[in-house]
Image: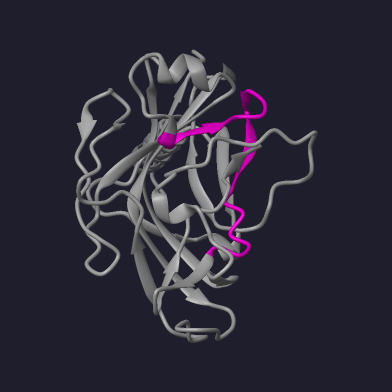
Amino acid sequence: MTLGLRSRMATLAGLLALASACSDGAQAPADTLTIHGSGSAAPALATHASAAMIRTPEAAFSEAILSGDPASMSVGMYALYVSANEDCSAPILVADYGATAQLKDFMQSPVLFTGSPAAGTYKCVIFKMSDVIGMVPATSFGACVAGTFYSGDIYRDGQTDWKDAELNPIIGTGTDDAPLDDHVAIFLTGNPAAVEARGVSENQVVLLHSDLIVPGQSTFYWNAEGSVTEEGGACGIQPGQPEFR
């Protein structure tokens, strides 16, 4: 090999090494926050009843209503916001799936979101999600048939009290018989009154039992036990009692 060829080879090797180093340096930072979902009840605490999400009239069960558990319960997730403020002001977008929701089966303990917000303590978490809930009953009872898919609409036509993360009004559409996907927001905070004072409906606020710490992991517990119901000859899904830990 001639001296000139050796020189050119050495130069090429140096350029490749430099390119590799630049590529490594440009890699996205590792995720510092992971949010899981769970269809089970949250671990026992000195219990404080969380604000019951979507307290519709149908959520007040009568003794005549039959109920059971879901084998699957799918929720479309759109985006995750966090805020350092108890009243959920100045929300920071952490993850965004765009216009197409990512379906998450809470009975399979899915990862709902990952992201890399700045390290610190956040006193509010906001989920942007679909208001159409899909489920499959684990057992057959009444009008509910095990293995059959059903869907329900938890923010319906005629409901107008909910707000999005920026406090813009959300107009409910659809019914259980004809569900329509409204992109709703669920606010999780240790101080629900502070969020409600900003005009957010109490029906979309859930108690946050402790601050969200980044880096870290947390779980959104849906507590779907008994949330599959048969009422008036129809099989449906109730909101459950969500908590965030």
Work out whether residue 29 or residue 225 is closer to the camera in this orientation and state it. 225
**Based on the displayed image, in which of its 4 quarters is residue 63 positioned?**
bottom right
For image coordinates 53% across by 58% down, the residue present is 61
> Can you say which quadrant of the picture contains the C terminus?
top right
- Say if 93 sits above or below 219 in the image: above
For image coordinates 58% across by 79% down, the residue present is 138
For image coordinates 49% across by 65% down, the residue present is 73
Return the x and y of residue 164 as percentages of the image width and height. Answer: 29, 31
Residue 48 belongs to magenta span: no
Q: Is residue 102 left or right of residue 123?
A: left
For image coordinates 39% across by 22% down, the residue present is 92
Return the x and y of residue 33 as percentages of the image width and height. Answer: 56, 35
- What residue span does the magenta drawing correspond to? 203-227
Name the colouring of the figure. one colour
Work out whether residue 19 or residue 148 is closer to the camera in this orientation and state it. 148
Work out whether residue 127 or residue 162 is closer to the camera in this orientation and state it. 162
- Say if 91 sits above or below 81 in the image: above
Residue 218 belongs to magenta span: yes
